Image: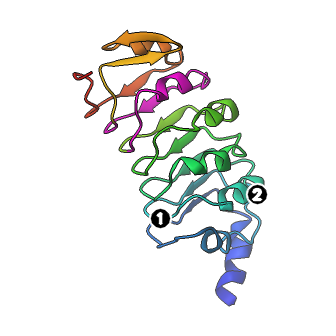
Amino acid sequence: MILFLGFEVLSSKLRELGLSYNRFNNDKSILSCFNGNLSILKSLDLSHNKLTAGSGLKVLSSRLKKLENLHLRWNQYNDSFFPSLTGFSSLKSLDLSGNQLTGSGFEIISSHLGKLENLDLSYNIFINIIFSHLRGLSSLKSLNLSGNMLLGSTTVNGKGLRTLEFLQSLPISLKTLSLKDTNLSRG
């Protein structure tokens, strides 16, 4: 009890919180850490847990209005969790690498996270359809799609594109793009 009371006092001053490798496996286990006032928190790392989709992130987004960096890499998220990210409208950096995401439903992210500058989607199971959903991220500067199942040809906005022509559909603000290990020579 004393430990949690101390965390509540400390939490009102926290700007960064790392909770990776804690074996969280559900929303209740995460939410129990957020009883305090975390209104000024800028960065949250929940990487390398066993988290799956649920309403916990939706609840957190209502409490963490100033959050700019969210690290959710190497959990067990699938596409059903995309709607739970829509409340994080202040996010500038989002790391979803190493989950089980295919991109179905990703368009909801592009329409709600307009301030997003850095996006890591590496080592998921995205296919080329992801390109048609990235255009809405007009502030995006860095994108990592390494280790996904991208092919050398794709369809974007109804047009068949070959090889790297799909790059034209990416946000004009993009400065860094990583496509390592994506099978671009095939297709």
Which residue corresponds to the image point at 69% horizontal and 35% vertical from the top-left?
112
Q: Which residue is pictured at 63% across the width and 67% down the height?
A: 27
Q: Which residue is mark 1?
A: 20
Q: Quadrant of the N terminus?
A: bottom right
Q: Which one is earlier in the sequence, the residue at label 2 or at label 1?
A: 1
Per the image, label 1 sits on a secondary structure element best described as loop
Residue 11, horizontal then vertical, whole percent: 70, 68
**Residue at x-position 34% and y-position 14%:** 164
Percent x, y for residue 47? 47, 59
User: Residue reaching furthest left?
Assistant: 185
Quadrant including the C terminus: top left
Instruction: Count how many numbered circles sit on residues in the image.
Output: 2
Magenta-drawn segment: 124-148
| Position in image of residue 37 (x %, y %) | 77, 65
- Residue at the spot x=41%, y=56% of the render? 74
Q: Is residue 49 above or below residue 184?
A: below
- Above or below for 175 versus 159: below
